[in-house]
Image (cartoon, rainbow, N blue to C red):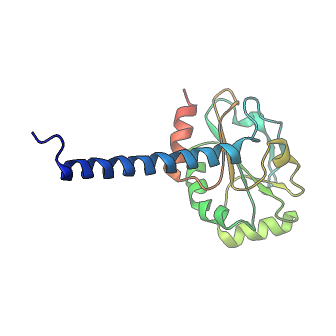
C-alpha cells in the first residue's frame, strides 16, 4: 500500500544486510573446510593392515560390505577427546577402525585409552605413516567408506554424532 514508506525501506535494507552477512559467513566456513580438507584422499583408500591394540589382526578389506568409518585421532588432541563419545557410540552400530596418530608407543596409547575409557578397535600409527598416506595433516580426521570400501566423505575437525551418522547413512546408497 505504501511502497516507498521510509520504515518499510529501512526494514528491507536491514533484512538484506542480515542475509548478506549470513551468506558471507557460510561462504567463509565452506571455503575454510575446502582449504582444510583439500589434501585428504578420495576414492580408493590407501591400504591399512596391522594388529589392533587388543591383538586382533586388521585389514581395511574387513570393513567392506557396510558403510564404515576410519577415524584418525591423537592423545594430545583436545578436540579428539571431545569426540570420543561420538566415535564410541557410532562404533556400536557401524564398522569402525580408529588410528592413534603419533600418540606414542603401544603401551602409552593403551594407557591413554584405558584412562579415557575409550574402547574402539584401534591401530597405533606411531610415526604417522598411515595418516600421511590418507593426506591427514591434522586431527581429528574422519573418512566414511561406502559399501564398496571407497571413500564417500572425508573431513578434518570436530564432527557431531548426527553429522557423522548422516554421512554414514548417505554412504549406504
| Residue at image point 63% right, 31% down | 146
Where is residue 35 drawn, in percent x and y?
Answer: 69, 45
Q: Is residue 35 left or right of residue 165?
A: right
Question: On screen, 67 above or below 77?
Answer: above
Instruction: Please tell me in which quadrant of the rendered image residue 113 appears.
Output: bottom right
Is residue 70 visible from the viewing direction of this image? no
Residue at 83%, 36% in the rendered image: 47
Does residue 8 appear left or right of residue 125 in this picture?
left
Image quadrant where residue 39 sits: top right
Vertical placement of residue 83 versus 57, above or below: below
Residue 4 in view, yes or no: yes
**Nearest to the observer: residue 149 or residue 91:** 149
Front residue of 121/161: it is: 161
The answer to whether residue 30 is above or below residue 149 is below
| Residue 64 placement (x, y as % from top left) | 69, 31
Residue that appears at 76% across and 29% down? 44
As drawn, the residue found furthest toward the left would be 1
Residue 60 % position (x, y): 77, 37
- Please, is residue 78 above or below residue 144 in the view? below
Amino acid at each position: 500500500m505504501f511502497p516507498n514508506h521510509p520504515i518499510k525501506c529501512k526494514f528491507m535494507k536491514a533484512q538484506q544486510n542480515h542475509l548478506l552477512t549470513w551468506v558471507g559467513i557460510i561462504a567463509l566456513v565452506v571455503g575454510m573446510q575446502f582449504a582444510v580438507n583439500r589434501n585428504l584422499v578420495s576414492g580408493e583408500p590407501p591400504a591399512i593392515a596391522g594388529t589392533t591394540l587388543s591383538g586382533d589382526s586388521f585389514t581395511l578389506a574387513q570393513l567392506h560390505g557396510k558403510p564404515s568409518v576410519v577415524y584418525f585421532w591423537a592423545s594430545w588432541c583436545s578436540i579428539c577427546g571431545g569426540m570420543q563419545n561420538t566415535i564410541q557410540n557410532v562404533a556400536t552400530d557401524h564398522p569402525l577402525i580408529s588410528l592413534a596418530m603419533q600418540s606414542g608407543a603401544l603401551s602409552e596409547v593403551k594407557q591413554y585409552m584405558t584412562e579415557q575409557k575409550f574402547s574402539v578397535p584401534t591401530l597405533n600409527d606411531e610415526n604417522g605413516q598411515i595418516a600421511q598416506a590418507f593426506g591427514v595433516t591434522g586431527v581429528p580426521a574422519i573418512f566414511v567408506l561406502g559399501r564398496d570400501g571407497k571413500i564417500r566423505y572425508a573431513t578434518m575437525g570436530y564432527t557431531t554424532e548426527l553429522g557423522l551418522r548422516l554421512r554414514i547413512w548417505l554412504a549406504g546408497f
